[in-house]
């Protein structure tokens, strides 16, 4: 290949070929694809902010939901904010510990055992179950016996979060090098010690951000809540009894109304939900960075 | 939990004889005992599933000596090393035949806890593997899992272990920094300090210098000589000069190729005093290896 330009100099110029052109074409294609992906995202954000920002105020976040015919200046989404926060929080309380423990079993203890393979398989199947089916499931086994409540909604959301938490935690645990486990074993640690004092701390950043992603996903779910919490217009602080409401449920309910005020409140609820998800992402980043302190 | 008691006893034994092992006169056989035998491996074979990785290894390892395992790749020296503290238990499908006696007690008897074994027989690995924790927490890890939570006591252990590992002066001002922020050689010395912090009876080293430059290697070799009066060391090395520099005894392992099944099995060819192995080995295969005529 090397064409000598003179008797004692080496020709290091780019040879004439398609290589550089191809590289530029592919780079341009990638930039184009990125822009295409960004357009819908930017459009969604722009629409939600432009239609929802004007209504957001402290009153909107706390006041009761007024009748749909009333204008945007009246009332707010307080019951939905409270409902989303308490239902999602309780679902997290159930799903995250269970999911993390399940993933620890799968990766640290189960190995290739039939039980571990079975759990892993069904956890993957559960990821693919449509969320409305989860809602119907909880409706059949819980709501029909004990009535609508925030708790029923938490159950449905927890069922949705569980496989996500298991999968993300499992992947994080798999990334922990075996050399670390061996180092701990060689000091006379038992398996439980190795898991608690070396494996979990090494993976905690990823586990937390995976769990928060699952929380954000669950907080935005409408379908599992349709059959489990209904909607209410006043704040129901009691998670364990009586119908409740949530931001996604209210977005759905308000968007189907013909009244301008109700629709405006729906946009406000959408923006509030996006803001909650955004805050969770920032918290996830912060926690991941905090735990990564000793990783390098 | 009766382990800590035995553990303390082993340590007391350890603390007493700071006397150098007397020079042993040339012996006819490799297995002739001298001083105290720490390990006595009897016809050890190790299988991974049905594959026999190492066959019929018998050797005795003596207290306060440095014993080197040398041999070509795939000859099973690391595998044999890992049978000495039951690290092979962690490998799925690994199975040991024969037995290893540690201070007269069988390591593979039914009621033996591998945890108790590893508390007495520590290990340093080929690749430095500090935990993603601070330097202080890395060293204090072992004592902590053994139940030591007194802050002052832990600080004392951390300083002593880091001094023993010749790392104290380099890290004393940044004990709170991550262990992973150190250079490769420092990380390996941190791992040695971490091992010494639990005051083991034996330190197994699996090619501890293979990832290090000559200066860091020299530091670790000096350190081995320094701690040998308190510990018994078994080291696997690919570097024959290292074996001659540091070890009192050398075991040469080789590979037997089974022509029928085309499988390779590690065997112990010769085990003797290091000078004997390198200057006047009994076996022609050893001679070929140490003179560089066989890989």
Image (cartoon, coloured by chain):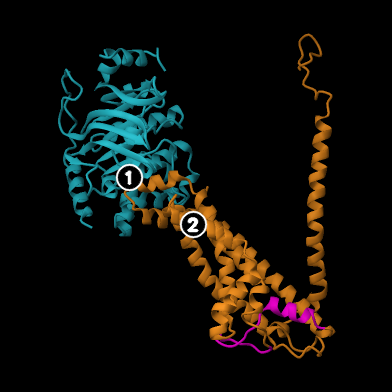
The answer to whether one can see residue A112 in this image is: yes
The residue at 41%/31% (across/down) is B209
- Foreground tag (1 vs 2): 2
Say if labels 1 and 2 share a chain. Answer: no
Q: Is residue B107 above or below residue B286?
A: below
The one nearer the camera, B88 or A286, is B88
Q: Which residue is mark 1?
A: B161
Q: Magenta segment: does it hold B43? A: no
| Parent chain of label 1 | B
Q: Secondary structure at mark 1?
A: helix
Judging by colour alone, the chain drawn in cyan in this rendered image is B
Location of residue A271 in the rendering, given as x and y in whole percent from the top left corner: 74, 73
Location of residue B100 in the rendering, given as x and y in whole percent from the top left corner: 23, 37
Instruction: Magenta stretch: give its range.
Output: A233-257
Q: Secondary structure at mark 2?
A: helix
| Parent chain of label 2 | A
The residue at 43%/29% (across/down) is B215
Disc marking residue A114 = none
Location of residue A187 in the rendering, given as x and y in whole percent from the top left corner: 33, 47
Quadrant (top left, top right, bottom left, bottom right) of the N terminus of chain A: top right
Q: Is residue B206 above or below residue B286?
A: below
Q: On the picture, is B16 further left or further right than B44?
A: left
The answer to whether one can see residue B223 in this image is: no
Q: On the picture, is B14 further left or further right than B225?
A: left
Location of residue B60 in the rendering, given as x and y in whole percent from the top left corner: 21, 30
Judging by colour alone, the chain drawn in orange in this rendered image is A
Q: Main secondary structure of the magenta part?
A: loop
Q: Which residue is mark 2?
A: A118
Q: How many marks?
A: 2
């Amino acid at each position: 290949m090397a064409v000598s330009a003179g008797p004692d100099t080496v020709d290091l110029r780019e040879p004439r070929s398609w290589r550089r052109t191809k590289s530029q074409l592919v780079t341009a294609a990638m930039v184009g694809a990125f822009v295409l992906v960004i357009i819908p995202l930017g459009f969604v954000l722009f629409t939600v902010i432009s239609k929802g920002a004007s209504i957001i105020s402290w009153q909107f976040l706390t006041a009761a939901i007024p009748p749909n015919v009333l204008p945007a200046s009246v009332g707010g989404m307080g019951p939905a904010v409270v409902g989303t926060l308490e239902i999602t929080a309780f679902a997290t309380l159930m799903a995250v510990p269970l999911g993390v423990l399940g993933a620890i079993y799968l990766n640290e203890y189960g190995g290739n055992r039939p039980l571990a393979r079975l759990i892993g398989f069904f956890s993957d199947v559960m990821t693919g179950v449509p969320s409305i089916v989860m809602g119907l499931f909880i409706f059949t086994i819980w709501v029909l016996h004990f009535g609508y409540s925030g708790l029923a909604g938490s159950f449905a959301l927890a069922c949705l979060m569980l496989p996500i938490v298991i999968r993300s935690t499992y992947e994080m645990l798999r990334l922990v090098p075996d050399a670390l486990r061996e180092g701990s074993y060689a000091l006379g640690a038992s398996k439980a010690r190795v898991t608690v004092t070396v494996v979990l701390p090494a993976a905690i950043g990823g586990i937390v951000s995976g769990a928060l992603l699952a929380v954000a996903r669950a907080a935005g779910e409408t379908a599992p809540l349709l059959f489990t919490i209904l909607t209410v217009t006043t704040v129901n602080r009691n998670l364990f009894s009586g119908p409740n409401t949530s931001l996604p449920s209210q977005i759905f309910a308000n968007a189907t109304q013909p009244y301008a005020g109700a629709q405006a409140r729906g946009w406000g609820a959408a923006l509030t939900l996006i803001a909650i998800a955004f805050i969770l992402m920032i918290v996830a980043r912060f926690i991941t960075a905090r735990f990564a302190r000793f990783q390098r | 939990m009766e382990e800590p008691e035995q553990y303390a006893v082993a340590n007391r034994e350890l603390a007493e004889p700071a006397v150098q092992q007397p020079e042993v006169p040339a012996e006819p056989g490799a297995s002739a005992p001298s001083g105290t035998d720490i390990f006595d491996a009897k016809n050890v074979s190790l299988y991974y599933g049905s594959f026999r990785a190492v066959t019929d290894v018998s050797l005795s390892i003596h207290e306060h000596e440095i014993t080197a395992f040398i041999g070509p790749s795939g000859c099973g020296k690391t595998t044999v090393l890992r049978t000495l503290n039951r690290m092979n238990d962690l490998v799925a499908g690994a199975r040991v035949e024969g037995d290893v006696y540690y201070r007269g007690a069988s390591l593979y008897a039914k009621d033996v806890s591998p945890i108790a074994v590893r508390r007495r027989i520590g290990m340093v690995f080929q690749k430095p593997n500090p935990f993603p924790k601070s330097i202080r927490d890395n060293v204090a890890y072992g004592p902590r899992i053994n139940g030591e939570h007194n802050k002052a006591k832990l600080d004392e252990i951390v300083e002593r272990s880091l001094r023993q590992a010749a790392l104290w002066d380099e890290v004393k001002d940044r004990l709170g920094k991550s262990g992973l922020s150190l250079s490769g050689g420092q990380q390996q010395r941190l791992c040695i300090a971490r091992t010494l912090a639990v005051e083991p009876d034996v330190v197994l080293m699996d090619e501890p210098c293979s990832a290090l430059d000559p200066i860091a290697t020299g530091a670790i070799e000096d350190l081995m000589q320094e701690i040998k009066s308190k510990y018994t060391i078994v080291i696997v090395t690919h570097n024959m000069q290292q074996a001659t520099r540091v070890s009192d005894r050398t075991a040469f392992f080789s590979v037997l190729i089974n022509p029928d099944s085309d499988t390779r099995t590690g065997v112990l060819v010769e085990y003797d005093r290091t000078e004997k192995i390198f200057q006047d080995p009994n076996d022609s295969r050893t001679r070929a290896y140490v003179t560089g005529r066989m890989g």
